[in-house]
Image (cartoon, rainbow, N blue to C red):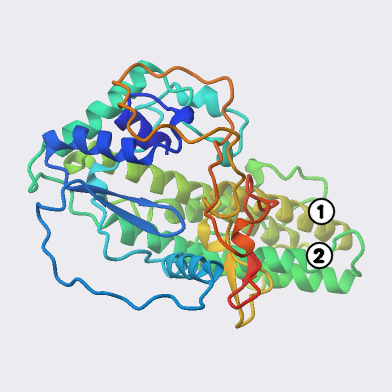
Amino acid sequence: MDTQDIISWGAVRPDRALEEGDRIKALCEWGREYDVDGFVRMEMDFEVMLCDFTSGVRVVSSLALAKAGTSSKASRMFEVMYAGSWHNRYPGETRIQLDLSGLISFYDTELVPSLVPARFGKERWDHRLLNISGEDLAQARVRLEEFLSKPAGRSSSGIDWLALIRVVVDRYSERLEFARYLLNSTSPDTADSDSMVDVAIKTQVQLRNMLAPYILFDVIPPSIMPKTEVRGLDVLDWARPAYRLCATTHTGMLQDNTMTSSEKLLLDAVQGTTREICRVVTKMWGLGVLAGVDQFVGTAREPDVETIQNLMKTWRKDIAKLMAWLDWNVWVKCRPACGLEEMCYLTTWPIGFPKRDRPRPPKNRDPVPPSPSHPSENDAPVPTRPPRGDGPPRGEPAEDWERPQPRCVRRIDPYTI
């Protein structure tokens, strides 16, 4: 909503959160100069907002559908949620093709540096544009307008960025999740020595599988590693070649001289992500080798209980920190999986959000002209009114509306939104 506001009104306007009519009118007025036909945005499902129904579209059919009959409003609202859930996973809504060569991101620290201190120490849930400076706001709008002003056949690298990003996610997402599962299947403090060594060996196999394409014949650890040796970067120098290959394989040959500024941002994101994944995984694998739990490469050390116990604790911290930093949506799922009469649901506006404690604005209010953004004293998300209905969707706000967590909800009456 914040990004729509700065295009519509030149500032984030929490006080106008419900003024949807004025917002789309202002967006269309702004986009007229660039021949923008409409806008697409995502809520429980995707919304297509056309600016002019007399231009670029034609009537294909005009059907008089039967009345809903005895179907409850709760049932109909659930079906909206269910239809939107079809696109929760990759590849998403395939009828919408994104041109990532013109991507504008408010996580671009060069484009909008004023947001860096505003977000410091906050979770991503709380990242908003309330504290963007007027200069950064103007710069972001100029970047967007420059992209829209260029001809359709503008030059770009031609790289399929969605495919490249998906390669990285596919390669590591399930393997990292499985390694974390193994590490959490036992406690280093309470497990017996045999169980702990068994889990360590199984985890080491998974770590090696992730690095297998990058472990060359000359990646050899020291033959002897004293127990008192500090586990720092110096003892893992021998594993650096595997790290370098891992970190550069997918992007090392890409040339940025033909890339747009948006593509360079994407390249930097992919490189930064693969470097961090490879750094952590190489470190974990290397420490496992030195601890004597690797079945293919080893040292003269025999695994002992204290070493394995410390190794497991380090591994658990490393993988938890990495996965929290990546925060990939493939890991957002209901555990255990929902039954056939249920659907995995993440609280999404407007269902489950609290009502606003103020009346709706007048319908014919004139849009506010663009002005520099002013920080708000209250940067909490602005909740909006849930839809009216005769079932649970009309009830109290969901307990997790501020920090949504996946949960199973019923697909049949009685609904449990």
Residue 80: mark: none
Distance between the Cα atoms at labels 2 and 1?
Answer: 11 Å
Spot occupied by residue 415 in the image (x, y as percentages of width and height): 63, 71
Q: Measured along the vertical axis of the image, is residue 363 above or below residue 172?
A: above
Residue at the spot of label 2: 303
Left or right position of 356 against 318: left
Q: Measured along the vertical axis of the image, is residue 47 above or below residue 125?
A: below
Residue type marked 1? Asn
- Residue at 62% of width from left, 30% of height from top? 121
For the question of whether residue 276 can be seen, the reply is yes
Residue at the spot of label 1: 310
Spot occupied by residue 217 in the image (x, y as percentages of width and height): 49, 65
Count neighbours of disc 2 (C-alpha within 10 A) and say few if under 14, some if 14 to 19, many if 20 or more.
some
Residue type marked 2? Pro
Spot occupied by residue 297 in the image (x, y as percentages of width and height): 63, 67
Query: Helix, strand or loop at disc 2?
Result: loop
Q: Quadrant of the N terminus?
A: top left
